[in-house]
Image: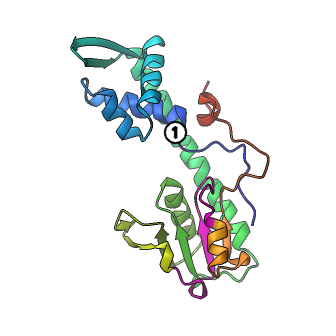
Amino acid sequence: MRSINEQSPPLEGTAYRELRVLEEMDGTAEISQRRLSSQLGVALGVTNLLVKKLAKQGYIRVTQLGWKRWAYVVTPRGMARKIHLTKAYVERFIDHYSRVRALLREDLRDQGFTPTTQVAVVGTTEISELAFLALRDIGATNIDVYAINPVRQEFLGITVQDLNFLAPSKYGFVVLTQSNDENGLRESLLSNGVLESQIVELFRVPDGSQATTDIDSELGTN
């Protein structure tokens, strides 16, 4: 199956985390870095470095209120940065959606896909939402959603099923939506009876390549 070009930036990265920090601080001035780390899903040290960077760039103002108590105020420059990042993120989201639509259409073309073909979407991330919407856009009506040990019960109104119970013979296509395969998901599916011809792997990174993590290249900002 074809994959989106490895140079296509991910929806989430350093710039996205910067945007999330500015959003959180704009809503709660006394938010702790530990809570920020939890909200962003990154290590405390990463959050600390990001906060220091934002302060150095003049996007936030930091005031010590007491022992281990800090207040963070988003400056006018920081508000402008937040708007800029939000706009860039929306544009990147739309770009990914267009790419997913094109990729799915190309991958499913001439492979027997019809609006009644049963499709399994693996994952419950933002990329999974893009894939789901793109499938609806090209006429898919029978879509199931799977995840490894799913935490959430529903995804876009559909009950999320445990991937361990996916029955390969039930589906014409199995759409993988993760940006990497560190857990060997693809090989696991193949070993459990899913055919190579059934797998649509949207964001496979070719061997030997490395996705950029540069803050501006991720969101196309300068």
The image shows residue 23 at horizontal and vertical percentages of: 36, 32
Foreground: 159 or 140?
A: 159
Residue at image location 65% in from the left, 32% down from the top = 217
Residue under label 1, please give it: 89
The image shows residue 103 at horizontal and vertical percentages of: 69, 61
Residue at image location 56% in from the left, 77% down from the top = 119
Foreground: 196 or 81?
A: 196
Q: How many marks?
A: 1
Question: Is the C terminus in the top left, top right, bottom left or bottom right quadrant?
Answer: top right
- Residue 199: name its quadrant: bottom right
Q: Amino acid at mark 1?
A: Tyr
As helix, strand or loop, the secondary structure at mark 1 comes to helix
Is 171 within the magenta? yes
Q: Which residues are magenta?
A: 166-185
The answer to whether residue 205 is above or below residue 89 is below
The answer to whether residue 71 is above or below residue 115 is above
Q: Residue furthest right?
A: 208
